[in-house]
Amino acid sequence: MEKNVEISILCEIYGKLLTEKQLEILTDYYNNDLSLSEIAENNHITKQAVSDIIKKGENKLFDLEEKLLIMEKMMKQEKLLQEVFNELSKIEEASSDKQVEKILNHVRKELSCLV
């Protein structure tokens, strides 16, 4: 997975565990695509301070994920759900029974809430 995407996901999961400043700067850098200079100017700090905050924030996010594995579990669940949806589609295609189709649509609807 690309680092930018990974950091963005980790911020969504663990962002409340960062300081406000860390989350704000990581969001500006990874989601808003601002440069170190732009972030430094907006926050009235040096580029080096921005870089340090980004590094500390990234380290904290990776450390939390290493310990809690929430993103890893979430990705596994999404993959499993996609496999279930694929199997439901195969069953639906193979069956001409309207009752089976109705049940499959209900199951699909219930599972889509988990995605």
Image (tube, rainbow, N blue to C red):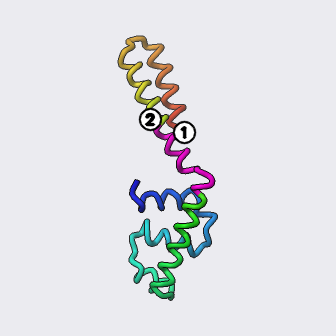
Does the magenta run of residues contain 67?
yes
- Say if mark 2 contacts mark 1, CB within 8 Å: no
- Disc 2 crowd rating (10 Å Cα; few below 14, some 14-19, many 20+) is some
Give percent across and percent down for residue 80: 49, 35
Give percent across and percent down for residue 65: 57, 56
Q: How far apart are marks 2 and 1 (CA)?
A: 11 Å
Residue at 42% of width from left, 79% of height from top?
36
Q: Which of 78 and 32 is in front in this view?
A: 78
Q: In this view, does 58 lie above or below 46?
A: above
Please name the amino acid that badge 2 sits on.
Gln
Q: Nearer the viewer, residue 78 or 111?
A: 78
Q: Nearer the viewer, mark 2 or mark 1?
A: 2
Q: What stretch is highlighted in magenta?
A: 65-79
Q: Residue furthest left?
A: 93
Q: Which of marks 2 and 1 is nearer the N terminus?
A: 2
Give the mark count.
2
**In terms of secondary structure, what is the magenta stretch mainly?**
helix
Q: Which label sits on residue 82?
A: 2
Residue labelled with disc 1: 114
Does the magenta run of residues contain 22?
no
Residue at 40% of width from left, 53% of height from top?
1
Residue at 60% of width from left, 72% of height from top?
20
